[in-house]
């Protein structure tokens, strides 16, 4: 599904340049649930941004579902993001003047899906994350866990190839964290490919594979026995 | 553009900070209101002054003979001369684009002695020998009877058309005027019509004290032979009499054996030039109105642009999220532009409506206090309103352009990082 070869990325900081990713080789199969771990500054967020086409790579190649991702203009990148990727952020990033169902329907709006169909689909995904009764509420009326579940529903609404989660539990207490992870595991069970960036070992253990980044290189890449989050809920 | 979701969002964004939106809108409202009021005031002045011109065919010049100031072909200087009736034919032949030529002879005039008698009443009036076309160059309302016609000229009928002032001086009230006779310098003329002139530029009284008789009868009765004292010449619409004036006068100089460089021999008055001078004053006034109005409007527009920049700044993160979710940058740009245009148009419309109410109020006031000198019916045409709307759309575009540009310049990743 994801194929990365010899990926380099550096940032210009004044006269210095900061070499963040130093030759990453990495691939993800369909249906995997991968945790990307590393301390802060290890390059895990940069990697995720490049995977999410929010940032451009300097060197190397990136294929997503067989499509080479390079030299995209903004319009093309936006299209690919909409079609291939679903984002889940640490700070939820819901649009605060739109209701839950409108937030979930946004990616569908950008796909030019009709209003009625959009609404139905969005409701369906809200139902999957257990928030159908909250559909008309604004994000400010939801708890943190609920907001993240809305964000997950939104990420899934466009039926993307890959879900990218950047510290999805970073802003949640451990109980809600496990609920969210339980949801993510269930989505993965349904066959979706998911990448989770985290620095919490217990969250990483709930994935099926852990990739350790340190100083811009992959130091460890291992398959693990998944810990089900449902036992903590 | 006619997308319900987009409009919903525009309304949501603009109403989320109502007070700020109204303050911003006020700038544009004020600009367009000033523009409309200035244009309407200019129009009111124009209407007032144009009414003073009345219905006179403005593309007209008048010329009359004076005394020569240069010797020429053995003729002395200081010679008095007259145009001849042949000159009219010569003008028709040689000068293109003419519409009317009215030769005229005149009796009486400014501070003239009593020259008209009826029974025991006498009066001093201007008596003109005229052609029928003069009524088109110097319009008057025929209040009873008729004006001179071509067969009056052909048959040299001794008839007269008298003004209201003449009627008051020579007739008793309720006396029958038509068919009665008046004696002009000892010659009897039958009154066949009365007129009234609308023109009121200072000599309104004088204008009603005139008597018109057929040119041919005048010449015969008062021994003018073929002489012509005065001519009114009108050019066709689209050809300016001012351009033809040179040719007309030099043709007259040749015909009358006047030195080509003698500038005093032929007196003339170019109504068209005067009219154009006034007209160009109005053009200048309109330009000033647009200039001032648009400058005021611009400050309003800068306000809108400023607020849109702030809105974009506030929504940087939201824009980042939306782009991460796959919104086309163009769609974001369009959104910002439409918000800006919508805000300008709504506030501009409010300004136009307010301006219209203001003009309506002024008109009602003018109607109730009666006519004011040199000011009449201030108004703006539909054309001006359309122009104002076009200006609004364009300025809305301009106001939104820079903010929209800055909205899509932000990389989604930077936008998401902004906390």
Image (cartoon, coloured by chain):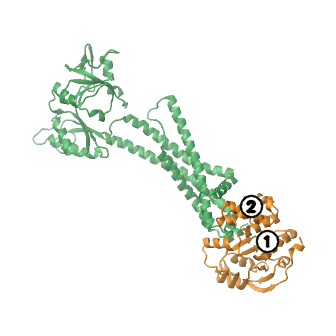
Chain colours: A orange, B green
Query: Is residue A101 or residue A168 the one in the foreground?
Result: A101
> Which chain does the residue under circle 1 lie in?
A
> Percent from the top left, x then y, of residue B145?
30, 24
Question: Crowdedness of circle 2 by 10 Å Cα count: few (<14), some, many (20+)?
Answer: many
When asked about the image quadrant of residue B342, the answer is: bottom right
> Which chain does the residue under circle 2 lie in?
A
> Percent from the top left, x then y, of residue B393?
54, 54
Query: Is residue B263 or residue A2 the one in the foreground?
Result: A2
On screen, residue B368 above or below A61: above
On screen, residue B113 above or below A92: above
Are discs 2 and 1 less than 8 Å apart at CB? Answer: no
On screen, residue B115 above or below B104: above
Q: Is residue B25 visible?
A: yes
- Give whichever of discs 2 and 1 has the lower sequence position: 2
> Percent from the top left, x then y, of residue B350?
59, 46
Side (left or right) of B286 relative to B128: right
Question: Crowdedness of circle 1 by 10 Å Cα count: few (<14), some, many (20+)?
Answer: many
Query: Is residue B42 or residue B138 the one in the foreground?
Result: B138
Location of the N terminus of chain B (image quadrant): bottom right
Disc 1 is placed on an element classified as: loop
Disc 2 is placed on an element classified as: helix
Picture residue at 27% right of the left edge, 33% below the top: B134
Q: Which residue is denoted by mark 1 in the rendering?
A: A168
> Percent from the top left, x then y, of residue B6?
64, 58
Residue A101, label in figure? 2
């Amino acid at each position: 599904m994801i194929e990365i070869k010899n990926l380099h990325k550096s940032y210009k900081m004044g006269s210095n340049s900061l070499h963040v990713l130093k030759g990453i080789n990495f691939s993800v199969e369909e249906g995997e649930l991968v945790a990307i771990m590393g301390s802060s500054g290890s390059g895990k967020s940069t990697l995720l941004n490049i995977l999410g086409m929010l940032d451009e790579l300097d060197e190397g190649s990136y294929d997503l579902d067989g499509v080479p991702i390079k030299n995209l203009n903004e319009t093309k990148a936006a299209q690919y993001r909409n079609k291939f990727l679903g984002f889940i952020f640490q700070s939820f990033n819901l649009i605060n003047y739109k209701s839950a169902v409108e937030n979930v329907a946004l990616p569908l709006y950008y796909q030019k899906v009709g209003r009625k169909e959009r609404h139905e689909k969005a409701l369906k995904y809200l139902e999957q994350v257990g928030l159908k009764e909250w559909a008309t509420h604004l994000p400010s009326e939801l708890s943190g866990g609920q907001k993240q579940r809305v964000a997950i529903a939104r990420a899934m609404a466009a039926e993307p190839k890959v879900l990218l989660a950047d510290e999805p539990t970073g802003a949640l207490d451990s109980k809600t964290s496990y609920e969210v992870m339980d949801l993510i595991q269930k989505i993965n069970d349904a066959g979706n490919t998911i990448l989770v960036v985290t620095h919490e070992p217990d969250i990483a253990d709930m994935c099926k594979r852990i990739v350790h980044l340190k100083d811009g290189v992959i130091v460890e890449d291992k398959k693990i026995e998944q810990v089900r989050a449902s036992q903590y809920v | 553009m006619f997308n319900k979701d987009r409009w919903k969002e525009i309304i949501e964004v603009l109403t989320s900070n109502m007070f700020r939106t109204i303050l911003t809108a006020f700038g544009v409202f004020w600009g367009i209101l000033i523009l409309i009021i200035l244009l309407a005031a200019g129009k009111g002045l124009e209407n007032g002054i144009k009414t003073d011109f009345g219905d006179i065919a403005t593309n007209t010049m008048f010329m009359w003979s004076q005394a020569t100031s240069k010797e020429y072909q053995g003729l002395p200087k200081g010679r008095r001369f007259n145009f001849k009736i042949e000159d009219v034919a010569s003008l028709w032949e040689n000068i293109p684009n003419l519409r009317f030529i009215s030769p005229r002879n005149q009796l009486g005039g400014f501070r003239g002695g009593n020259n008209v008698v009826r029974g025991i009443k006498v009066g001093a009036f201007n008596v003109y020998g005229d052609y029928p076309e003069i009524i088109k160059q110097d319009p008057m309302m025929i209040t009873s009877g008729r004006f001179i016609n071509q067969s009056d000229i052909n048959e040299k009928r001794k008839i007269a058309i008298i003004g209201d002032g003449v009627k008051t001086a020579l007739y008793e009230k309720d006396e029958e005027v038509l068919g009665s006779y008046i004696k002009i310098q000892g010659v009897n003329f039958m009154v066949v019509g009365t007129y009234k002139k609308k023109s009121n530029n200072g000599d309104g009284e004088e204008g009603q004290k005139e008597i018109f008789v057929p040119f041919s009868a005048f010449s015969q009765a008062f021994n003018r032979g073929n002489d012509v004292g005065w001519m009114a010449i009108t050019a066709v619409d689209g050809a300016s009499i001012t351009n033809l004036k040179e040719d007309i006068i030099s043709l007259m100089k040749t015909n009358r054996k006047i030195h080509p460089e003698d500038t005093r021999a032929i007196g003339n008055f170019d109504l068209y030039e005067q009219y154009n001078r006034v007209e160009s004053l109005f053009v200048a006034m309109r330009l000033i109105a647009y200039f001032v109005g648009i400058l005021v409007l611009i400050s309003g527009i800068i306000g809108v642009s400023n607020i849109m920049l702030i809105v974009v700044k506030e929504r940087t993160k939201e824009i980042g999220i939306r782009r991460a979710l796959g919104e086309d940058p163009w769609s974001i740009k369009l959104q910002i532009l439409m918000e800006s245009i919508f805000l300008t148009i709504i506030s501009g419309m409010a300004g136009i409506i307010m301006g219209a109410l203001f003009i309506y109020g002024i008109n009602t006031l003018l109607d109730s206090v009666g006519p004011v000198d040199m000011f009449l019916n201030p108004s703006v045409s539909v054309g001006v309103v359309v122009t104002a709307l076009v200006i609004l759309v364009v300025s809305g575009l301009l106001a939104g352009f820079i903010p929209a540009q800055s909205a899509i310049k932000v990389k989604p990743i930077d936008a998401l990082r902004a906390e």
